[in-house]
Image (cartoon, helix red, strand yellow):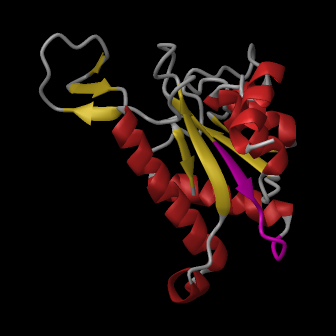
Amino acid sequence: MNLTEIRKRQAEVGTYSHDIKDLWRNWLAHDCGIDFNFGLTVMPGKKLVKHLAGVRNVNGNKAYRHMTRTELEQALKKLVELLNRLIYKNAYRRYGKKLEGIMVIEGEQTGRDLHAHLALNKPDFITIKQFTRLVRRALEISGEFLINDPTYNANTDNFDKKYRYKLDIIDRDWLYYITKELNRLSVHNLHFI
């Protein structure tokens, strides 16, 4: 039996019927050598626009617009660089130590608010409490992401609605969730850190 016959039989059985989306999701959740243990969801802030005709979101003399996909990618790269500097300090610059992870940008295809999910591998030498503080500090320094929800009302809303970012301990199923918007033919919104 030669290679072409083996491939024909495998195609008949259905081995090659998976699309790119399923292959990426299975690889990330099961076969990837990195065990991601923290998930971070961030919502970008709005950009200030000085002169724009016909703006609906006008506060005083300031007009705001949502971030574009490329602006969000740049802000995420800046956030990851800040996290690396805060966690690894000089080892990031000298030895190239950095966080391992992936980031997925969502909301572009569905028309919802553009936001990002990050799956990160927390280093072993810092505690969970230190890691959460460093993530919050990096979000504050970057200034590109919302930390508190401006529409939060303590009397009516639950406490989980107070913040516009969320840092959780994750399992493998979370990777399926964050890759739900991958296209069948393209994975343009999946980025490796």
Q: Which residue is at 20% across, 25% downward?
A: 61
Q: Which residue is at 49% across, 49% downward?
A: 76
* Residue 53 on image: x %, y %: 12, 15
Quarter holding the N terminus?
A: top right
The range drawn in magenta is 118-126
**Residue 175 visible at all:** no
* Residue 127 on image: x %, y %: 85, 67
In front here: 145 or 158?
A: 145
Locate residue 43: give its quadrant.
Answer: top right
Locate residue 161: give its quadrant.
Answer: top right
* Horizontal arrangement in the rendering, residue 57 relative to residue 18 (left or right): left
**124 over 129 or under it: above or below:** below
Question: Residue placed farthest to the bottom in the image?
Answer: 94
Q: Which residue is at 25% across, 22% downward?
A: 60
Q: Tell me if residue 11 is in the magenta stretch.
A: no
Q: Tell me if residue 119 is in the magenta stretch.
A: yes
In front here: 87 or 189?
A: 189
**63 over 87 or under it: above or below:** above
Question: Residue placed farthest to the front in the image?
Answer: 1
Q: Which residue is at 72% across, 22% downward?
A: 17
* Horizontal arrangement in the rendering, residue 42 relative to residue 46 (left or right): right
Locate residue 174: give its quadrant.
Answer: top right
| Number of marks present in the image shown | 0
